[in-house]
Amino acid sequence: MKYWLSFLLVLLLAGCATPAPDAGSAQGAASLTVVTTTTIVGDIVTQVGGDHIQLSILLPVGADPHSFDPTPQDVAQVADADIIFANGAGLEAFLDNLIESAGATERVVYLDQGIEFVSGLEQAATGEADHAGGDPHLWTDPNNVMVWVHTITRTLNELDPANAITYSANADTYAAKLLTLDSWIRQQVALIPAENREIVTDHAQLGYFVQEYGFKQVGAIVPGYSSMAEPSAQELAHIEDEIASLGVKAIFVGNTVNPTLAERVAEDTGTQIVFFYTGSLSAPGGEAATYLEYMRYNTTAIVDALK
């Protein structure tokens, strides 16, 4: 349980505010040009920055962060940004070359700072040394997003002290929503019998959710943290045996990945496939258009399949 961490971060956020700006300071207009990598990071940054930032998001809705290939327009966008926020932890494999090309190395903030990585599945077969020794899907636990909020708030306050009071107030409001979300997830998971809390995914992407909310990661179709990895025939046979022997009720497949392998395993084992959102929010107005909606949608999908 991370309630103590969440409470501490709320207190820290309250301390981020600076004295009120002079009456002549600019208020209301966008003060900073901000770029984020994913729609998920973009939504969290928007919750803190509000109208005081002009936000651009590199990955379009539905894009897989593991396989994204930036364009020359993306390079120009990053070059013009005051600050770039990224998930980090090796998720955005494209980012190093992009920021080097844009001359923006000193303007990137990685939101993995201050988060203890989860490492539960073998990476040797997939060669995923890039993932900093752990699962890069940090946002699947809203307690990690609480850490993001603190990092984002501190960064915006330093860059734009004239609007620091607003950023810190926005952060406090959103932190309370994250605490409510965490409590709701726990209530929903409690509806699943303990013996049914076994998770199989298309690739290892729910490590933080699994650890925080009392699930067991039985395995993954691709036994690594990237959807780009290729499992061996032996690895596929092993996961099919695990699913069959444990009576796993569902295989959870991200909506940004090719489901072909998961469909094959599901057919071989007679297991249902449940699609859920992974590295991207839905389109605006959709069922997972914000991070809070995304987590509620995914939690509901998991609970409904396993209870």
Image (spheres, grey):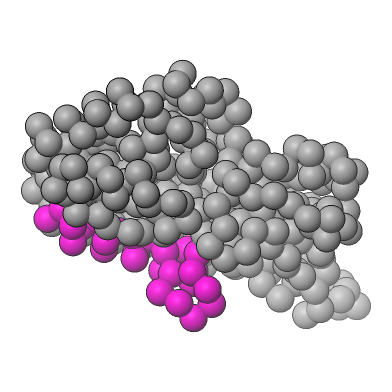
Left or right placement of residue 42 versus residue 164 in this view: left
Q: Is residue 54 magenta?
A: no
The one of 168 and 217 positioned closer to us in this rendering: 217
Q: Position of residue 111 (x, y in %)?
A: 62, 44
* Residue for point 40% across, 22% down: 122
Left or right placement of residue 145 versus residue 105 in this view: left
Q: Position of residue 193 (x, y in %)?
A: 8, 48
* Residue for point 39% across, 35% down: 222
Q: Which residues are magenta?
A: 281-307
Query: How many marks on residues?
Result: 0
* Residue for point 88% across, 53% down: 79
The one of 68 and 156 positioned closer to us in this rendering: 68
Left or right placement of residue 253 versus residue 241 in this view: right
Q: Position of residue 63 (x, y in %)?
A: 57, 58
Q: Is residue 289 magenta?
A: yes
Q: Is residue 94 above or below residue 119?
A: below
Determine which quarter of the picture holds residue 178.
Answer: bottom left
Q: Is residue 10 above or below residue 25?
A: above
